[in-house]
Amino acid sequence: MPDPTETLRIEYGAELDGLRVVRQAPPPGAASFSATYVGPAGWGFDPPGREGVARLVNLIVTSAAGRFDRVALARRLDRAGATLSAQCAPESAEVTVWGPIADWEPLLALLSDVVLRPRFDPSDLARARRQLLEHQLREMAQPAHRAELEMLRAVFPRNHPYRESGLGGPKSIARIARADLVRFHRAHYTSGDATLVVTAPARLGEVERAARRLFARFAESRAPALSLPPTSTTRSGERKIDLPGRAQVEVRIGGPSIARSAPEYPAAYLANQVLGGRPMLSRLFQRVREEGGLAYHASSTLEAMRFGGYWVAQAGTGPDRWPTVRKMLTEELERLRREEVPSDALDRIRESAIGEIPLALESTSEAHELAVDLAYHRLPEDYWVRWPGRLRSVTPRELRESVRVALDGRSAVTVLAGPLAARAGGARAN
């Protein structure tokens, strides 16, 4: 009987002209495969004055490629029972194909077309430009989006890749022409420091041979370098953005954090789970949402990327309650920094986190996400196999020490966005 834990392991293969090949076994009995290209094509690489070009390219590459226009590509995927998707982040961009195991090579060929030969048809550029402009409007007008943006701008200096959301502005989007998309694609989608992750029953050698044939002469230049200005660890203060007429106030408290490969990451991961990363069990959920009934949501995030990251504690509440909620978030952050988490509470959180791993092995798409995470951050092949043991070894003292490195509330920035002037009485949040 196949060992399901084999899916937790990956195999690093050869580097083919700047493209590293990674293979993962599918979950036992799986009927689908998945493949992801991930490379240095995030919005941290946007050229000055052309902010938004990375997101535009990422939106358009899955529309039409090679001999397939938009309609032909959609029909090809439909016939195969397959999907294409794309994601963009500050450091990188991803393109993923998912479909039946029996068609893994033809679908991998389709992925190579999308990655290497996008058409950038004018109609697709017009559509993608409209989408980004709509996102920009929401980012400026909706409290949650605005609070997130203002927090990042407060934490990171100008020209830092983590400072913006990659949407650009109306002027920068209007400047972007098809030639800009082609130029960005050539420099960032077909350069070095990219990875192809394939979850399929084929052996690593078969995957390498297919990749060598389909992604031939991949690299056209050296890998682009991401500019990372130093981040101050002493930034603090409060920003208020009054958005009259909105229903709730979004509270964000956050600061810079560690990279995914940092030795403190497992302990910091658990610290974030204790604070607000674990639904129902976390302190923010229990105190602010359940006991106080003061927030529509309350949680925290540790965003650890390849070169650095940030953390944020957040809540959405009524216009009359944000001072109380802000105080609660601050108190819970200070409590996590000053006091060791009781062993029984830590055990409850960590066993809940460990329990997620087997669930991820129930589908190819979720198992594949684990492999992509591993490969992008260049972690050991058996990292996920050893992950439960590493979490179980974290002591309350180690967790507390990691907070001072990865979730330091003493230098945090606070952002409030929403109808701040509306402080009349109201009903409890629910």
Image: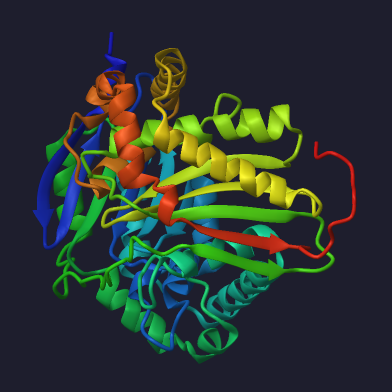
Viewer-side residue, 212 vs 297: 297
Viewer-side residue, 7 vs 82: 7
Residue at the far top in the pictured view = 1
Which image quarter holds the N terminus? top left
Q: Position of residue 409 (x, y in %)?
A: 44, 49
Residue at the far front in the pictured view = 338
Q: Is residue 16 left or right of residue 372?
A: left
Instruction: Using the rendered view, name the quadrant where residue 6 is placed.
Output: top left
Residue 49, above or below 208: below
- Can residue 365 be seen by looking at this rendering? no
Q: Position of residue 253 (x, y in %)?
A: 53, 53
Q: Position of residue 394 (x, y in %)?
A: 28, 24
- Can residue 428 be seen by looking at this rendering? yes
Viewer-side residue, 215 vs 328: 328
Viewer-side residue, 366 vs 30: 366
Q: Residue drawn at (65%, 60%), measured in percent from left and top?
A: 416
Instruction: Using the rendered view, name the quadrant where residue 158 is placed.
Output: bottom left
Instruction: Using the rendered view, name the quadrant where residue 48 is placed.
Output: bottom left
Q: Is residue 406 left or right of residue 352?
A: left
Q: Position of residue 411 (x, y in %)?
A: 41, 56
Tally of numbered discs: 0
Residue 42, above or below 326: below
Q: How is the image coloured?
A: rainbow
Residue 29, above or below 227: above
Q: Residue drawn at (50%, 91%), measured in percent from left and top?
A: 175
Q: Residue drawn at (48%, 73%), measured in percent from left and top?
A: 56
Q: Residue drawn at (25%, 24%), measured in percent from left and top?
A: 390
Residue 351, above or below 20: above
Which image quarter holds the C terminus? top right
